[in-house]
Image (tube, rainbow, N blue to C red):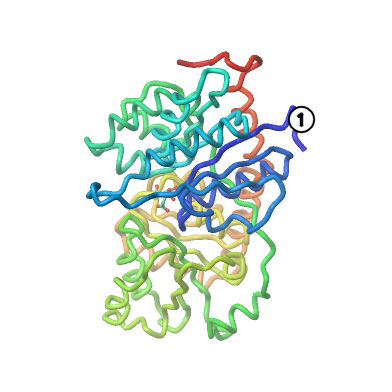
Amino acid sequence: MTAGRPLKIGITCYPSVGGSGVLASALGEELAKCGHEIHFISYERPFRLPAEALRIHFHPVIINDYDLFKYPDYTLPLSVKMAEVSRNHGLDVLHVHYAVPHATAAILARSMLPPEQQPRVVTTLHGTDTTLLGRDAGYGPAIRHALNCSDAVTAVSSFLQHESQRLLHFEGPIDVIHNFFDPHPPKRSREEVRRELGLNDHEALLLHSSNVRPLKRIDLLLETAARIRPVDSFKLVILAGGSFAPFTGQVRRLGLDNRVIVREKVSDIEDYLQAADVGLFTSESESFCLSILEAMCFACPSVATRVGGIPEVIEDSVSGLLIPFGDIDALARAAESLIQDTSTRNALGRAAQQRARERFSADAIVPRYEALYRRVIGEVRGLRPRG
Ligand code: GMT
C-alpha cells in the first residue's frame, strides 16, 4: 500500500497492441494494487487490462462519425472526456502515454476546468511520438507545445530523452523512467506450449513479438531466420500484434514455411515466453523494446540490433547479444551460437532475468512514478510547480 494519501490518476494510452499501451495498463494495475484509484480514458479498454480489478475504472471515449469531416477527430472528444472524468472524480493527475494526441488533449482538458479542479498533466514519451512524429513539421510544434505545458515529462530511456531534446527542441526537464514488466503466471506448461507449436526436442524456439510495423523490420527478421544453419535446428515463433499477411509471401520465397509459426494478437504472452529459448529482434529503431524485457523475465536472452535504447536493456554479451543494425549474417551467426551452445544461452538468460528483476521490475519502477506524481501535485493543491 502507498505511503501517502491514495491518489486519483487518469491514464490515457492506445488500447491496441503496442508497448506504450502494455506499459500504461501494467502501471495502472500496479498503482491500483498500491491503493490508488485509477481511471483509464481511451476509445477501447486496453487489451491487457484485466476485465475487472479493484480500483480500476474504464471510461470510453465515444467518437461520432460526421459526414462533414473527411478525417474523424479523436482529440476533442478525448479532451472532453478527460475534463469530465477529472471533474467528476477529482483526478490529481492525468498521465498520458504517447504524446500524440494524448498530451494535447490533456492540456486542452485541463484548460476547460476551473483552477481548483485542474489535474496535473504527466506526459510519457514512448518512442515514435518523438522519433517519427517529432520530425514531422505537421506534428513537431504541437508536441513541443504539449510538453511545455505538461507538469512533468518522462521518457522510457536515456536514448529517447536525448532524442526528444534534440528533435523537438524541448528544453524542459525529462525524467528517464525505464519500462517495467512483471509477468503473470503462465496458464499452460512449457511442454504444452511446445507441443501446440509442434516443436521436437532438438529444435530451439526463437521468439519474436511485436506489432510488426515497418520499424520492426520483419523483412530482416525473416532474412536472418533463412540464414540460420542447420535449418532444422529451430522454429521461429512470431507473436504478431498486427496482421502478418504482408509477410507471408516472403516466408514462402525464403522456404521458411516449416520454420515460421505465426500467432496473431496473443493475450497469454507468458505461455509463449516461458517456452522460448532465444528472442530475435531486428528493429531499425527502438526506444526501449519492451518485448526484449518480457523475454528476459523468463530467462530468455535475446539477439537484437544495437539501436536506440536497446543497449540500456541488454548489456552486450552479459544478458544478451547486440549486433550492428543491417548485419544479417552476424545476426544469424549470433542466433546459431545460442541455439547450439546451451550453457552460454543459460548463463545469458540467468543474467537477463536478474537484470530484469533488479532494474526493470514493478518494485523498481512504480515507486518512481508515484514519487513523480507527488512531486507535481506539490504540498498545496492549486499551486503549480512548473510553467
Ligand atoms: O513500436 C511500438 O511497439 C509502438 C510503440 C508504442 O507506443 O506502443 O512502442 C514504443 O514504446 C514501447 C514502450 O515504451 C517501447 O518498448 C518501444 O521501443 C517503442 N517503439 C519504438 O521506439 C519504435
Give coordinates of residue 88: x percent, y percent: 60, 34
Give coordinates of residue 63: x percent, y percent: 40, 49
Q: Residue at x 41, y 35 (%)?
A: 105
- Name the amino acid type tagged 1: Ala
Q: Residue at x 74, y 39 (%)?
A: 35
Position of 279 with respect to 211 (left or right) is right
Q: What secondary structure is marked by label 1?
A: loop
Query: Which corner quadrant of the image does residue 55 belong to?
Result: top right
Which is nearer the eye, 223 or 11?
Answer: 11
Give coordinates of residue 38: x percent, y percent: 63, 41
Which is nearer the eye, 379 or 311?
Answer: 379
Position of 72 with respect to 238 (left or right) is left
Q: Which residue is mark 1?
A: 3
Position of 149 with respect to 68 (left or right) is right
- Quarter of the image that includes the N terminus: top right
Circle 1 packing at 10 Å, graded few (<14), some (14-19), many (20+), is: few
Q: Is residue 134 above or below residue 304?
A: above
